[in-house]
Amino acid sequence: MNEFDLIRRYFTRPSSQSVLGVGDDAAIVRPRVGYDLHMSVDMLVQDRHFFADVSPVALGHKTLAVNLSDMAAMGATPRWILLSLAVPAIDEAWVAGFAQGLYALASQYGVELIGGDTTRGPLTLSVTVLGEAPAGKALKRCAAQVGDDIWVTGVLGLGAVALRERLQPTGAIPAEVLEQCQQRLDFPCPRVEMGKSLLDLAHAAIDVSDGLLADLGHILTASAVGAELWAEALPSLSWLEADRSQWLECMAAGGDDYELCFTAPAHQRQAIEQRGRLVGCRVSRIGVVKAERSLQLLGQSGERIVLGRTGFDHFK
Ligand code: ADP
Ligand code: MG
């Protein structure tokens, strides 16, 4: 099997949403009138973003999920993707699994693979995603306002717990908890529906990939504001919440959550909770935006908590 057979067999499917899909020198799309085109790219590199033994199905899912998560954070609807693939050799079983994981998630969100590039090299996976949102309506990082509530979707820290237990096994985590954490690390759930439904409710948003504190920090910097976060309010699995001091660092600074952190005016509280129920996404109010430009994590009696690490930086 050569490069072209591989593309034809695994990465070519008829496309109904694009003008021209896989097979020519470029794909052609036509965004809807009145919408802005959103574009983003994310790359996963073996031994940096994933272990060599991760299943290809999980990798296919995650490579796309991290990109859909970026669209969700803008409030955009993902529509098209391009896939760049470097593989050390053509291993058909691996490619079939990868394509299965990728297409399963893509079809869940009506996203179409319309092109890409394939080459030999150390295993590297990159998806470029194109999405749409009503013109001028995106949830930008720079839009947080003093007095905004700070919210987060879903649960935090699961991916980080799975990663920590793999790197420094303690054997102290019950099997079913660890299983949920591992599932989250391998199959993150992009909050696309919630992101879209926040367009008319929230001010600023970001997806939590490098850790809540680090990613919220990006909103604060871009918006020239600060914030106070309440450690007790950070949502996680109840087993992890029960020993919060032990797991706080995973929840607040772990990364690999792919939840949305967003800010919204206080008068939208009920609407946000209602939207969360409507799309089946837990939402938790975890802090407030302040004028003073610092980010403080506060304990139960208002004491300041300082964590050993605050987030993930590839070059640290
Ligand atoms: P070119 O030489 O013009 O770059 P390629 O031979 O790389 O073209 O690709 C041929 C066609 O296959 C193009 O339409 C390209 O977008 C598509 N393609 C290549 N690799 C992939 C991939 N991994 N997934 C989806 N489409 C791909
Ligand atoms: Mg090419």
Image (cartoon, rainbow, N blue to C red):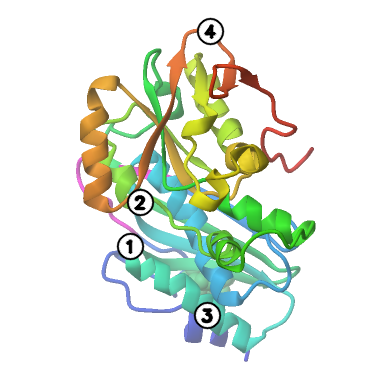
| Sequence-first disc among 4 and 2 | 2
Residue at the far top: name it.
292
Amino acid type at image mark 2: Val
Residue under the image location 54 percent in, 30 percent down: 231
| Label drawn at residue 109 | 1
**Residue 153 percent coordinates (x, y):** 40, 43
Amino acid type at image mark 1: Tyr
Residue at the far bottom: name it.
1
Q: Secondary structure at mark 4?
A: loop
The C terminus lies in which quarter of the figure? top right
What residue is shown with label 4?
292
| Sequence-first disc among 2 and 1 | 1
The N terminus lies in which quarter of the figure? bottom right
* Quarter where residue 205 is shown: top left
Locate residue 153 relative to residue 40 in the image: left or right: left
**Residue 253 percent coordinates (x, y):** 63, 38
Ligand 1 closer than 8 Å to label 3 CB: yes
Report the span colored magenta.
Answer: 29-39
* Quarter where residue 262 is shown: top left
